Image (cartoon, grey):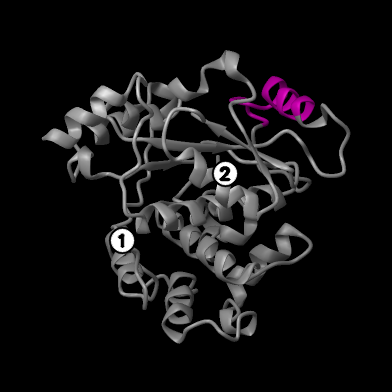
Amino acid sequence: MAYWGLKGVAAAIPEGVIPQEAVIGLSPAGLLFALGVTAYEVFTSTFPWERSQSIQTLQDHVNLTGRDPRDWRKDLPEPVARFLMKAIDRDPQKRFQTPSEFREAIKALPTPPRRSVLILFVAGEEQGLLGSLYFSQHPIVPTGKIAADINYDGGNIWGRTRDVTYVGKGKTTLDPIVDEVARRQGRAVKPDQFPDRGAFYRSDQFSFARTGVPGVYLGTGLDFIGRPEGWGREQIEHFERTSYHQPSDEIRPDWNFDGMIENDQLGFALGVKIANGDALPAWLPGDEFEAARKAALAR
């Protein structure tokens, strides 16, 4: 299983497994560690531990301290470096203990975002979006004050792409922001490339949409660099036939996470722009969820 945070997949790969879990397996504490590894990668463009073979990476987690991020980024502010090293500390007692502590540390950085960032781990998606549905019905802040939901529900395990899939494209004012950030990466934004499957209504952003919160659901593109046309669709369909929701759906050494990292970076940059934006994102006029947003804002 892959474990997803604000930026995605770190807990699903060897670089994102905490030292103790390299031995005993994944636990909830690993989710916060994975967020730290992802943040480290965003700021430095590399991982604190990275070897050619997964087993070497896991051994490094047990035996070594992650490299100081300033080894890669000399201009990195010292408070940011401290935050990253605390997030990936080998000693579990020295790491962030709760999502609240992690959030407060982000807020304490030299330039925190103008809006708060809520990191939500939801479960029961395959049983009817149970986790996100519960939160949307019992939010800790009014849904009218939630600017947007950035949803990750799967990852690219085949390599870099020239495009990124945006499920829900054409429904909100978030479209030009996603286009802008993707353009910086040299990538095109495509709408749902398997529209017959109704992915927008089967993933967790749907729970938020029903309460009026605009969302971005980023997925794997199909135009893979160095691959012939149609190769990406073939890989996804083959995985679904042979591994999806089956015992063989396990991490494999031949997975390529380069494209997943790019999607993570896109989502992080998108979150920063939304958190610092003047206007709240909105549904386009006439959209099926526009009325829910107006009602939430009026409360």
> Can you say whether 230 is above or below 15 in the image?
above
> Residue 91: horizontal and vertical position, in percent?
44, 75
Looking at the image, do the residues carrying marks 1 and 2 touch, with CB atoms under 8 Å apart? no
Instruction: Please indicate whether residue 76 sits to the left or right of residue 56 in the image.
Output: left
Q: Secondary structure at mark 2?
A: helix
Q: Nearer the viewer, residue 171 or 83?
A: 171
Residue drawn at (68%, 65%), measured in percent from left and top?
57
Tell me the distance, in whole angstroms, between the alpha carbons under discs 1 and 2: 34 Å
The C terminus sits in image quarter: top left
- In this rendering, which labeled residue sits more in front, label 1 or label 2? 2
> Can you say whether 64 is above or below 18 in the image?
below
Residue drawn at (75%, 41%), measured in percent from left and top?
158
Magenta residue span: 233-248
Q: Which mark is residue 98?
A: 1
Q: Amino acid at mark 1?
A: Thr
Residue for badge 2: 179
Instruction: Please indicate whether residue 133 sits to the left or right of residue 174 in the image.
Output: left
Q: Quadrant of residue 106?
A: bottom left
Q: Nearer the viewer, residue 195 or 236?
A: 195
Query: Can residue 12 be spotted in the picture?
Result: no
Query: Can residue 206 be spotted in the picture?
Result: yes
Q: Nearer the viewer, residue 30 or 25?
A: 30
Residue drawn at (40%, 22%), measured in percent from left and top?
127
> Can you say whether 275 is above or below 179 in the image?
below
> Residue 174: horizontal and vertical position, in percent?
44, 40
Residue drawn at (28%, 57%), measured in percent from left and top?
116
Magenta residue check for 200: no
